[in-house]
Image: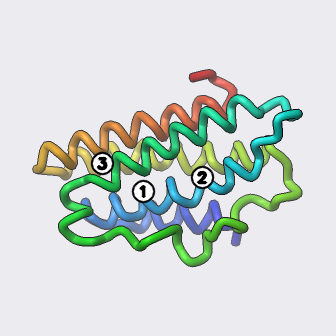
Amino acid sequence: MNADHDVRARLRAAEGLTAILAAAHDAFEWMLPVLEGHEDPAGAMFAAFVMAGAAAADGRDALAFAPSLLAASGISGGPPAACGPQAGPDRGSGARAAGAAVAAVCALLVSRLGEAGSLAADRGDQVACADAGRSAGKVRRLLAGDGP
């Protein structure tokens, strides 16, 4: 199974606020090296990958300070085991395939973070979910060719 499938499976399986926040944080962590690995200055998608990388870092950072995640120490300290920096869409698959895989993860992130925000009682968690959801949406739009 590809790493992006593993990331999506973990996001789908996460139950409860803290588990969704941790899975979402790790999904952003997973996508950063995938995006960076496809930042080819000569490629047609260079600007999209650079901008998507910045948005993904913003999403990760928003979740890193979510009160429920901090209280539970739910951040795994990096991407899921199957999703290390070399993992992801097949490196030979090209920028479009990598962009599509990350965009698919981001579509699920938007949905799960919306759900997590509605579960959150703490205003800090609600803001973290909203901010990270906006970041995931931006990454998806950039990589799907919809613009920022």
The image quadrant where one finds the C terminus is top right
Q: Residue at x 19, y 56 (%)?
A: 67
- Which numbered tag is attached to residue 32? 2
Q: Position of residue 107 (x, y in %)?
A: 52, 43
- Crowding near the residue tagged with mark 3, few <14, some 14–19, many ≥20 C-alpha atoms within 10 Å: some
Q: Amino acid at mark 2?
A: Leu
Cα separation between marks 1 and 3: 12 Å
Q: Residue at x 60, y 54 (%)?
A: 31
Left or right: where 145 falls relative to 8: right
Residue 143 quadrant: top right
Residue under numbered circle 3: 115
The image quadrant where one finds the N terminus is bottom right
Cα separation between marks 3 and 2: 23 Å
Residue under numbered circle 1: 24
Left or right: where 143 falls relative to 138: right
Q: Amino acid at mark 1?
A: Ala
SS type, badge 1: helix
Q: Position of residue 137 (x, y in %)?
A: 49, 35
Going from N to C along the chain, the mark reached first, 1 or 2, is 1
Q: Position of residue 13 (x, y in %)?
A: 42, 68
Foreground mark, 1 or 3? 1
Q: Residue at x 71, y 29 (%)?
A: 47
Q: Residue at x 36, y 68 (%)?
A: 75
Left or right: where 125 falls relative to 52: left
Cα separation between marks 1 and 2: 13 Å
- Crowding near the residue tagged with mark 1, few <14, some 14–19, many ≥20 C-alpha atoms within 10 Å: many
Foreground mark, 3 or 2? 2
Q: Amino acid at mark 3?
A: Glu
Residue furthest to the front in view is 41
